[in-house]
Image: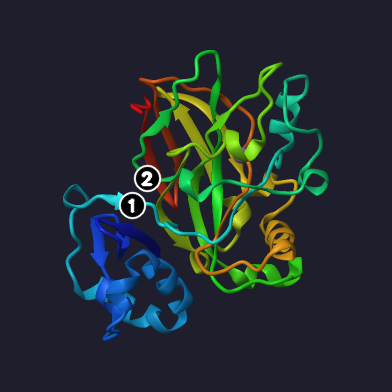
Amino acid sequence: MRIACFNDHRVGVLVDGGIHDVTDLVDGDDEMAGLATELRVAELISRFDELRAPIVERVALSTPIALSEVRLRCPTPRPRNFWAAPRNYATHGAEMVGTLSAGQGTPRELGLFVKGGGSLADPDGPIELPPLPGRRFDHEAEIGVVIGRTARGVSASEAMGHVFGYTLVIDATMRLTETQREERTMRKSFATFSPVGPAILTADEVADPGLLTVRLWVNDELRQEGSLSDLIVDVAGLVEMASAVSPLEPGDLIATGTPAGVGPIAPGDEIVIECEPIGRLRIPVTERSW
Ligand code: MN
């Protein structure tokens, strides 16, 4: 099942023919639900065991709304924790050797970093590049792990039981120069630098996460391709690492790292990122207007 957010924080199930609205199933007769629209998807994730059957019934019995009639929104709108893994594919680590970068090694040595929640963007973007002449901005194609159950200090062997599902993330990045060496968190947290979506593919439909393959094109040129089986620290290991720092909550997001082929983007470019069972995003790159 692919869980999506659309319009003004409505939640639904994405299918080939459109989207089934399940907002009322999440809200039920809770009088407070209207106050918590931003948290609806976290509510759906938290109570998914109980909501799954009525949602499956809704999908079977209702007509989906055409995608042309809705606006898809970021399916992880308010993660309490938004972690990301540096250099988690050997091929990307290799291409960074000799460049200016924040550190050498793998996530085992470097740990995880955080991306600001303010960088999250809807599935259709755009990615808006700030007006900083001479700075290079790169795309990073990543698969995101969405947490389903509170995870505090979980071991890798327990970790997959805390995973709700998988989504697509672009980890847009401003690169260092010889004289400009800002913290990674700042360089990756500009507004719109983290488009997510189009939906969260629930883990029960992913028999082997290692088979999830992400591809990214810029202006129809294939730039990146990699599978979760290529990760240096796998999904369970990433959940273990993040949950050792601070408890993870339903709806939290971990970007798993990017394969080789990272390259520059500029206003006017169009990025396409795809993972077949999750979906596809088409994202324009623009210049920020402010
Ligand atoms: Mn990254």
What colour scheme was applied to this rendering of the protein? rainbow
Q: How many marks?
A: 2
Task: Using the image, determine if residue 28 lies above or below residue 82.
Answer: below
Local SS, label 1: strand
Residue at image location 25% in from the left, 65% down from the top: 20
Local SS, label 2: loop
Task: Give the percent coordinates (x, y) of residue 261.
Answer: 60, 27
Task: Give the percent coordinates (x, y) of residue 180.
Answer: 66, 21
* Disc 2 within 8 angstroms of ligand 1 (CB): no
Q: Quadrant of the C terminus?
A: top left
Amino acid found under the numbered disc labelled 2: Pro
Mark 2 or 1 closer to N-term? 1
Q: Nearer the viewer, residue 220 or 120?
A: 120
Q: Is residue 57 visible?
A: no
Residue at image location 57% in from the left, 74% down from the top: 149
* Quarter where residue 1 is shown: bottom left
Give how far apart the Cα atoms at labels 2 and 1 are.
6 Å
Residues marked 2 and 1 touching at CB (< 8 Å): yes
Q: Is residue 232 visible?
A: yes
Residue at image location 42% in from the left, 74% down from the top: 43
Amino acid found under the numbered disc labelled 1: Arg
Report the residue that reaches farthest toward the top: 134
Callout 2 crowding tier (Cα within 10 Å): few <14, some 14–19, many ≥20: many
User: Badge 2 is on which residue?
Assistant: 123
Callout 1 crowding tier (Cα within 10 Å): few <14, some 14–19, many ≥20: many
Q: Is residue 70 left or right of residue 56?
A: left
Task: Give the percent coordinates (x, y) of residue 123.
Answer: 37, 45
Q: Is residue 160 left or right of residue 217?
A: right
Q: Is residue 50 left or right of residue 206?
A: left
Task: Give the percent coordinates (x, y) of residue 22.
Answer: 28, 71
Q: Which mark is residue 73?
A: 1
Task: Using the image, determine if residue 227 lies above or below residue 253.
Answer: above
